[in-house]
Amino acid sequence: MMLARLLLSCALLLHALPTWARCQPRAEEGAGWTSSGERALPSWQRPRVRPGVAAGLSVLPGLGHAYACDPVGAALFPISVGASLGTAVVLVADPWAADDPLAQPAMMAAQNIWFYGIYDSFRIASLMRGERADRQPVDRAGIGSHLAAPYRVRNLRDPWVLGSVGVGLAAGSVVTLLTVAESQPVWARKTLPWAGERIPVGAGLPLGLAWEGLVFTGVGVGEESLFRGVIQPVLVDALGAPGGIVLSSAIFGAAHIRSLERPGEELINAAVVGSLGGLLGFVAHRDRYVLGRAIAMHFWYDAALYSAVFLLAPDSMPWAFSLSTRW
């Protein structure tokens, strides 16, 4: 398996090496700005660029952007992924910081920047290609709009987003009560655990909620950009909307399987996550792959779920050594 991955990586690298020599100036220098005024499309482009190839090459961060003649993305994504991974390694490597509450966000940031880089190269290549017959549309908004999506007023008022909050609170409460034993809720405590220390509830409560916002904003943007921004449109193109949404949701659920030591729990978890992915996929498809609402739904579901866990069983949160439930 490792040899196959190495050979695949080498093949992708060899395919992309001559790409800069093939870059040509774009005919319309001013075209390609997003509606929010974010970064324009590169002023250079590759003839007959293929979005799927760009996304595949971005498995190695930056390579898909190089293929699409985007020097900014080619430099930005590998540097960002490397910096996040380096930060996580430094935090974990220190024996006194093995359970540092910032180590997990740094590691997850690396994953989500990687995911978003795959999507961003796919998006850029798709926009360069122009209108494509029988192909799903591509969101013209960039990273700034996507990061702000969970906090936009129109999304906060949206019934789908409000519903995701309710579902997240209910799921988190039920799962915590069923799986966590002998844990005092926040309102029955004077202190809360934080990286092996005890801090007053008045400080620990906002700190924990801020931690959730930091983590789940990246999760919502990263996972939606990859699964609903790349994988689902490609599968919908190939299989039609019902088949594409179902298969991409199944992949989304399977991607959340972390271990086969407890296959029953993991399969249930995958089924639940896959079902939620199907709902997000339906919303994204209905929104013509403008991802803002799906990102907001994903963020607020996760934030509500973990807020319920936090309020009912603070000792189960990641910064308190371990997490009892992965839903």
Image (cartoon, rainbow, N blue to C red):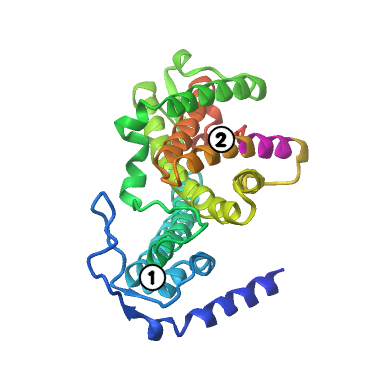
Q: Quadrant of residue 266?
A: top right
Above or below: residue 284 compared with residue 68: above
Which residue lies at the image location 34% right of the left edge and 26% below the top edge? 203
The residue wearing badge 2 is 279
Residue 63 appears in view: yes
Residue 274 coordinates in the image, percent (x, y) = 63, 39
Residue at the disc numbered 1 = 74
Magenta stretch, overall SS? helix
Please check the rendered image and state whether residue 269 is part of the magenta-colored stretch, yes or no.
yes
Residues 194 and 70: in front is 70
Q: Amino acid at mark 1?
A: Ala
- Relative to the observer, which residue lies in front, 96 or 313? 313
Q: Quadrant of residue 210?
A: top left
Residue 259 lies, with reference to residue 134, above or below; the image says above
Residues in magenta, as a range: 265-273
10 Å crowding of disc 2: few (<14), some (14-19), many (20+): some
Residue 100, image quadrant: top left
Amino acid on which disc 2 is placed: Leu
Label 1 neighbour load within 10 Å: few <14, some 14-19, many 20+: many
In this view, the residue farthest toward the top is 188
**Viewer-closest of 62 and 88:** 62
Residue drawn 48% across the image and 42% down it:
284
Q: Is residue 86 magenta?
A: no
Image quarter of the C terminus: top right
Could you tell me which residue is drawn at 47 percent across and 83 percent down?
17
**Residues at discs 1 and 2 in contact (Cβ within 8 Å):** no
Query: Which mark sits nearer the N-terminus, 1 or 2?
Result: 1
**Viewer can see residue 96:** no
Labelled disc at residue 228:
none
